[in-house]
Amino acid sequence: MAPLLFLTGYMGSGKSTVGRAVARLLGWEFIDLDDAVVAQGGLDISSIFRREGEAGFRRRECAALREVVERAPLSDGLVVALGGGTLTNPESAVLTKRRATVVYLEVDAAEAWRRVSGSERPLAQDRDEFERRLTQRRSHYEAAADVVVPAQANSVETLAGRIADLMRQKGRGER
């Protein structure tokens, strides 16, 4: 069975950036789930949110995740950066735990806001709502995680190296 690693955490935790670095270190493929949703639906995330709301986006996201999980055995190894809200969908949460290692990149609200404020992310427009959403989602991240990695005090290289080493120790990493 091909190794599969999911990175979870809130917006701005570094899932995509760290995920690319981990994949490079392990010689694995990398998929950003948000990019997969866009590619599958032909609409950018802001447009999906405007047309279908968050519930519509989560349905699309779950469909993209299902496709990624089905495709994973065909790869030599796969790192997937989940969306910040992926695990709020019960079906998506089950898909992530099926046979993957889940790493939670933990970041506090102030640091996450610093990283994403001013972006066009639909759920990062109001700071109070942003912080409330993180508080609600934290339990989803913790419940799914095999490992929690504090993300804000470390460089991308340090985080990627630590996660790659973890996968190698589990016998799931190449090189």
Image (cartoon, grey):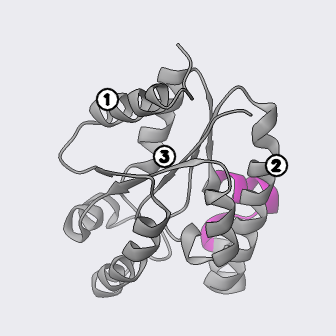
Disc 3 and disc 2: Cα gap in Å?
Answer: 21 Å
Of label 1 and label 3, which has the lower sequence position?
3
Residue 60 can be seen, yes or no: yes
| Residue 137, image x, y percentages | 42, 76
Q: Is residue 93 left or right of residue 156?
A: right
Q: Residue 16 carries which label?
A: 3
Which of 97/82 is in front? 97
Tell me the residue at 56%/70% (across/down).
87
Snapshot quadrant of residue 65: bottom right
Which of 90/135 is in front? 90
Q: Which mark is residue 93?
A: none
Overall secondary structure of the magenta stretch? helix
| Residue 31, image x, y percentages | 63, 43
Question: Are the two marked residues, 1 and 3, in contact with CB atoms closer than 8 angstroms?
Answer: no
Question: Are the two marked residues, 3 and 2, in contact with CB atoms closer than 8 angstroms?
Answer: no
| Residue 82, image x, y percentages | 56, 56
SS at badge 3:
helix
Judged by depth in the image, the label closer to the viewer, 3 or 2, is 2
Say few, some or many: other residues with alpha carbon within 10 Å of mark 1 (under 14 / 14 to 19 / 20 or more).
some
Q: Is residue 13 left or right of residue 82?
A: left
Q: Residue 157 carries which label?
A: 1
